[in-house]
Structure formats: structure tokens, C-alpha cells
Image: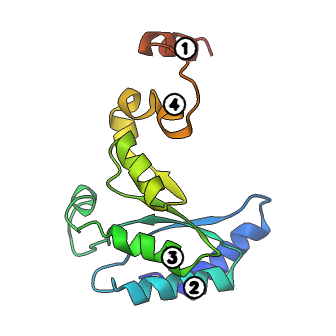
Amino acid sequence: MLKPKLVGEAMSAIAANTNVPVTVKCRIGVDDHDSYDELCDFVYKVSTLSPTRHFIVHSRKALLGGISPADNRRIPPLKYEYYYALVRDFPDLGFTINGGITSVSKVNAALQEGAHGVMVGRAAYNNPWQMLGHVDTAVYGVPSSGLTRRQVLWKYSAF
């Protein structure tokens, strides 16, 4: 398990060499180190030992005991309650929820529940048009461009 002090030192070193904000992406725990108190300790120490003010939280723990990365994305249960508790308990920090967000309706539900941001990974990669084709309208209220998939691909290929 990563030590918060080492992560804080690494984030400080990274921040010293860039002019953009630094973020940490983490799981809610590792193996048997998966209590909410341990997660809070990690977030608190990293945020006080470094300029990190935003965490991207994958809402399931990592199991390092010989299971595959694919199994690590489905076997440990999602614990969104840990994420929302972080949002509540650390009001001066920003948090993006990650893990198991597979539709635009789930994005909107997370935002309505108080998520600061939502990271969509494999769902967008595996089905980009369904996840991203109308996201600006569905999430941000931007008027639809009316473009078809074919038109988007044509415009993209022109670059």
C-alpha cells in the first residue's frame, strides 16, 4: 500500500515542475486496508503534505492477491458511499467519482447526488457514440449539434 507521506512528497515534486494543478487518482483501499478511516487518513495526509486539492476516487478497492486487472474492475464491490462521504467530510477539496459509471443517466445521477465530477472510462472507450455522442446536451444542456456519427467521423478524419 502506498504511504501517504511518500505520495505527498511525490505530488509536491510534480507540482514544483508544472504550472497546472496536480491530482491523485486512487482506489478506496487495497486488500485489507479498506476502511473509510484509512481512506480519510490518506486523503488528509496527501492534501496537507502537498498542493493536491483534487482526488479522482475509484469507488472499489484493489485486490492485489493474484486476480487479474479485469477481475479487479468487477469483483470488489463498488462503495460509492465512501466517495460521497469524502465529499461531505472534506468540503475544501474536490473529488471526481470513478468506477461503474456506464451511462449518461448514471453521470447525471452522480452529479445530482453531489459529485464534483465524474470520470467515465471503459464505457466511453467501448461505446463512444452512446456515451459521448450527446453528452454535451444531456449533461451540460448545450443545444444539440444534430450531427450524425458519420458526420462526426468525416469531420474528425479531415484532421
Say which residue label 1 marks.
157
Occupied quadrant, residue 18: bottom right
Closer-to-camera residue (80/114) = 114
Dots 4, 2 in contact, CB < 8 A: no
Eye-nearest disc, 4 or 1: 4
Q: How crowded is mark 1: few (under 14 residues within 10 Å), some or many (20 or more)?
A: few
Q: Position of residue 61 (x, y in %)?
A: 32, 72
2 or 3: tag closer to the N-terminus: 2
Reply above or below: 82 against 25: below
Mark 4 and mark 3: span between their CA atoms? 28 Å
Cα distance, mark 4 to mark 2? 36 Å
Sequence-first tag of 2 and 1: 2
- Tell whether 103 sits left or right of 112: left
Residue at image point 22% right, 75% down: 65
Q: Which mark is residue 137?
A: 4
Q: What residue type is labelled 4?
A: Thr
Going by the numbered disc 1, the residue's amino acid type is: Ser
Q: What element carries label 3?
A: helix
Front-lying residue, 114 or 25 = 114
**What residue is shown at x 51% (from left), y 84% (from top)?**
42
Real-space Cα separation, disc 4 to disc 1, in angstroms? 23 Å
Q: What residue type is labelled 3?
A: Arg
* Mark in front: 2 vs 3: 3
Q: What's the residue type where badge 2 is placed?
A: Tyr
For marks 4 and 2, the one nearer the N-term is: 2
Query: Which residue position is annotated with label 2?
Result: 44
Q: Which of marks 4 and 1 is nearer the N terminus?
A: 4
Q: Determine the CA span between mark 2 and mark 1.
A: 45 Å
Examine the rendered structure and indicate whether residue 6 appears above or below residue 65. below
